[in-house]
Amino acid sequence: MRFILIDRILNVEKNKSITALKNVTLSDEIFIDHFPGNPIFPGALIIEALSQAGGALVEISNDFKYKAIVFMVERAKYRDYVRPGDQLILKAEIINTQETYVHVKTKAVVNNKTKVSADLVFSLLRMEDFFNKQFQFHSKILYEIWLKGKVTIKNNQ
């Protein structure tokens, strides 16, 4: 993954919802080209951030037995720009779970205003069948960073 777009998971309720944080800073590499003199955080990267948050919810809810891979973006709506200095709150809620996929409703919010929303569908891949031990190790480290601190994990089963 080239861009890790979650700085912290603020809270997660298994099988229900997650809230994560992305601090948008002028030092983000993307602002070199997007756009000089008028920095705007790309909508595609906001969808990626929402995918990472939604995927984290699915993976945590399944006790990390599966890797959640987004394979469908539905009803994506871009309402306003996201700029350096914004604190992007990423919210995701599980809508429907099937045997091989999970449907998640997401939104990216700045100062209580929705900037981007999308419905995402994730495919579930068994971790040990598709990913080597090195990937699994790096994924574990990433979750340790994301979940560090004052995170609340509720088990809603």
Image (tube, helix red, strand yellow):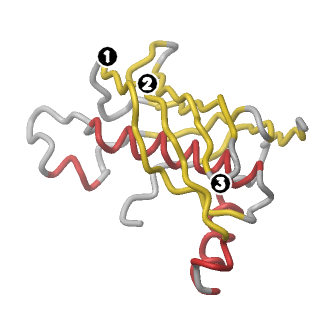
The amino acid type found where label 1 is placed reads Arg
Residue found farthest to the front: 99
Q: Are marks 3 and 1 in contact (CB under 8 Å)?
A: no
Left or right, residue 115 beside residue 53: left
| Residue at position x 53%, y 29% in the image | 106
Residue that numbered label 3 is attached to: 146
The amino acid type found where label 2 is placed reads Ser
Q: Are marks 2 and 1 in contact (CB under 8 Å)?
A: yes
Q: Of the residues under marks 2 and 3, which one precedes in the sequence? A: 2
In the depicted view, which residue is nearer to us: 34 or 135? 135
Q: Quadrant of residue 155?
A: top right
Residues under labels 2 and 3: Cα distance?
22 Å
Left or right, residue 6 beside residue 45: right
In the depicted view, which residue is nearer to us: 50 or 103? 103
The x and y percentages for residue 105 are: 55, 28
Q: Of the residues under marks 2 and 1, which one precedes in the sequence? A: 1
Q: Point out which mark residue 19 bears.
A: none
Which quarter of the image is occupied by the N terminus?
Answer: bottom left
The amino acid type found where label 3 is placed reads Trp
The x and y percentages for residue 104 are: 58, 34
Q: Of the residues under marks 3 and 1, which one precedes in the sequence? A: 1
| Residue at position x 68%, y 43% in the image | 98
Q: Dot 2 lies on which element?
A: strand
